Structures are given as structure tokens and as C-alpha cells.
Amino acid sequence: MIRILIADDEPRTREGIKRVLEGWLTESYHIAVADNGVQALELLRQQPVDVLISDIRMPGLTGLEVVEQLSTIEDKPHCIFISGYSEFAYAQQAIQLEAVDYLLKPLAKKEILAALDKALRRRADKQAQEQLKKVTDVQLAELQQQTTHPEINKAIEYVRANISEPISAKQLAGLLPMNANYFSQLFKEQMGISFSDYVTRQRLQLAKRLLLTTSLSVQEIAEQTGYQTDRYFIRVFRAHEQLSPAQFRKQR
């Protein structure tokens, strides 16, 4: 759901923006309104919103002051400032607060919708980054970067390219070619984790990305990440994430 707050002390402007948005939005949304800065700040503290459309000059607190007081809130809204005054200082402050846009009254429907579209694209980009953080094994990425051994780098590339297939240390050693026991020892020495642990973590990293970004079934994801049965995949996933794949997917 898209959550929007419109803050403006002019009822006509406030309701006009609301009507424009209601006529344009196609997905589920909730639009709240505030007629002064103090009320806007209270609403924002009670319920985070995705987009704040705020007049700059309002009773109690200016729109700029409202946003400044949200600096400690992790889930800050994407802000669109509106004003009846073409003052450079306002525009400069809006830029410093990372505003999506700064619009001058009287507002044109086209300008409002263009600014909202930009804000929603920023929201989508932020959500994509947050999803990426959930699926990225940071330690694994660091371990991969630290090794310079050519044979280990070949093994890493092979695992990435064949993650949906059965992979074993013996199989990799034969491809390099190298003694299987020596390969296992060398891999752990270079990477700090065993080869089997590395493969499992790569499989689970891909599985988490597929769970959050696709509608593939758990069985299909198990197949694409190299597990022969979804039952075994679920067991391994739960052991590492303390959640089942279905529970993890609900976090979207």
C-alpha cells in the first residue's frame, strides 16, 4: 500500500492535490491530510508514510522544520515541497533535505503527478535496495574478494555458474585437476570456510533472492538452487535462517 500525507493550511490546495492523486493512483493507497505543521509531525510519528507532500509555510511548524525533526526516524518519507514563494533559500533547504521536488503554486496537475511518479520510483529503488540487503551474504562476498589463488577463483566461478547442479569437492578437484583432499584443505585455508559450507551459502543466497523477487514455488526454487527435493531444501533453509522459506517470503 502507498501511504501519502498532504500537509497544507489551505483547504482548497489540500483537497485539490488529494483529488488529483485519487484520480491517478491505481494500486492500493491511503491518503491522510494535515492543516498545519504540528499536526503533520504528529501523524508522521504515529504512522510512517511513503510520500509527504507539504507546503513550506504553515502554522506551528514549516514543512522544512517538520522534515528536519524526522532526521532520527529510519523510515523517512520521500518529500515533495510546495510553496507560493519563489525563494532560493527554501529551494536550497529542500535540496539539503533530499527533497524529490520543489513546486511553486499555483500547482499544475501535470507537475503534481510528475513529482509523485518520481517519489514512487525512489520508493521502489529504496525497497529494492532493502530487499538486496536481506539476501546478500556480506561475509561471503568479503571472503570471495580476499582470495587471489587462481585455482580457488576457478572453483568459485564454477559454483556460481553451476549452482543449480550437484556440486562436490571431489568433482571440483577433478576439474582443476587437483587431489580432492588437498583441494578441500586449500579452499578452507584461502576462504576460511569449508567448500561444502560455501556451496550451501551460495545456494541459500540465491534462494532468498528468488523468494523475495519472484513468484516461483518453493519446489521450483529448490530445483534452481541445486536441491533434489523441496523437503531437504526447507530443512537446510530453516537450519540457517531460523525461518521456513514460506515465512521468509512473507517479509516482502
Image (spheres, rainbow, N blue to C red):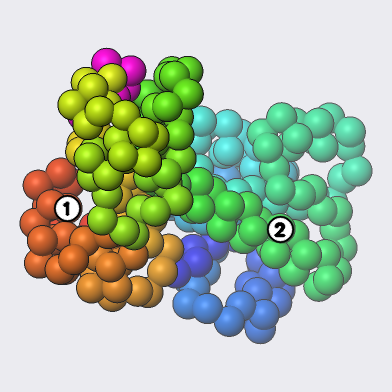
**Which residue is more in the foreground, 216 or 95?**
216
What span is in magenta? Answer: 187-194
Q: Check if residue 189 falls in the magenta segment.
A: yes
**Which residue is more in the foreground, 115 or 56?**
115
> Who's the residue at 79% across and 48% down the image?
102
Mark 1 belongs to which amino acid?
Phe
Task: Quadrant for residue 143, please give it.
Answer: top left
Residue 171 against residue 177 in the figure, above or below: below
**Lateral position of residue 43 relative to residue 27, left or right:** left
Residue that badge 2 annotates: 118
**Lateral position of residue 19 relative to residue 172, left or right:** right
> Who's the residue at 45% across and 51% down the image?
161
Q: Is residue 223 visible?
A: yes
Task: Mark 1: give few (<14), some (14-19) or many (20+) Cα within 10 Å.
Answer: many
Residue 149 against residue 113 in the figure, above or below: above
Element type at marker 2? helix
Task: Quadrant for residue 211, please give it.
Answer: bottom left
Query: Residue 177: where, in percent of width, then height?
Result: 36, 33
Residue 116 against residue 140 in the figure, above or below: below
Query: Residue 179: where, in percent of width, then height?
Result: 25, 28
Quote the CA–CA distance across marks 1 and 2: 37 Å
Checking the image for residue 250, the label placed there is none
Checking the image for residue 237, the label placed there is 1
> Who's the residue at 39% across and 34% down the image?
176
Mark 2 belongs to which amino acid?
Lys
Quadrant occupied by the N terminus? bottom left
Query: Residue 249: where, in percent of width, then height?
Result: 28, 63
Q: Check if residue 4 falls in the magenta segment.
A: no
Q: Is residue 74 visible?
A: no
